[in-house]
Amino acid sequence: DTAVSQTPKYLVTQMGNDKSIKCEQNLGHDTMYWYKQDSKKFLKIMFSYNNKELIINETVPNRFSPKSPDKAHLNLHINSLELGDSAVYFCASSQAGNTIYFGEGSWLTVV
Amino acid sequence: KQEVTQIPAALSVPEGENLVLNCSFTDSAIYNLQWFRQDPGKGLTSLLLIQSSQREQTSGRLNASLDKSSGRSTLYIAASQPGDSATYLCAWLGSSGSARQLTFGSGTQLTVLP
């Protein structure tokens, strides 16, 4: 069973569209994250939720909105997509600062 | 602001060699340090986690060390194999504040030649 699963794995969409990426973890962790990996492979935190509450909200455009319906899910919705949003988005989870587990990534291409 | 630096950015070695990857961080208020592996087109796989109270961790041919005073961690890979080819990332987790977040280095791209 996949510990952290995110869908879709690949997404190609036009500028201006709205899209969502879903993430689920079956590890019973209390904290979930969204990371963005740019073309230079640098990973940067976007959001972090602990027990459904937002605890980290880095400087990202407000077109990005995370939603956590429960501890096991953290979805990322992106409005009015721009070319610069093209990247790989990783969902991850951890328990109390211990080992962090990553999903396989969602490759977003905005054309 | 915390900075995590990895040297070298890329490394190519013949099969069988022992090698060391370096990671340095500027903030010594560390909770733990993690090493990850990322294969092309894949997510990150956790390799080793060293708590701030530990000096090293070992898993198979991998050994990671942590020196808080100098702000450094190393990942030692013994008897490298072509299957070890991947990008290796270190990530620092701070000990202060409730909003802990991992800060990643930019990675070392390792190629092990058969």
Image: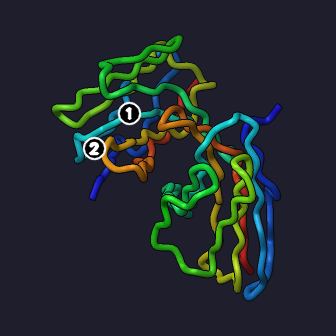
**As shown in the figure, which amino acid type bears the numbered disc 2?**
Phe
Residue in the picture at 40% in, 45% down:
B9
The residue type indicated by label 1 comes to Asn
Q: Is residue A4 above or below residue B14?
A: below
> Disc 2 and disc 1: Cα gap in Å?
12 Å
Residue B54 to residue B72: above or below? above
Compared to residue B1, the image places residue B101 above or below, namely above
At a point 55% along the width and 27% down the height, the residue shown is B113
Q: Nearer the viewer, residue B112 or B75?
A: B75
Neighbourhood count class around disc 1 (C-alpha, 10 Å): few under 14, some 14–19, many 20 upward: many
Q: Mark 2 and 1 residues: CB-CB less than 8 Å, in contact?
A: no
Looking at the rendering, in which quadrant would you find the C terminus of chain B? top right
Chain of the residue under label 1 = B
Among the 4 quarters of the image, the one containing residue A87: bottom right
Nearer to the camera, B39 or B100: B100
Residue at 53%, 55% (x, y): give it. Answer: A41
Q: Nearer the viewer, residue B69 or A42?
A: B69
Q: Is any part of residue B38 visible from this angle?
A: no
Q: Which residue is mark 2?
A: B25
Q: For this view, does A17 lie left or right of residue A81?
A: right
In terms of image quadrants, where is residue A67?
A: bottom right
| Residue of label 1 | B32
Label 2 neighbour load within 10 Å: few <14, some 14-19, many 20+:
many
Q: Is residue A80 visible?
A: yes
Dot 1 lies on which element? strand
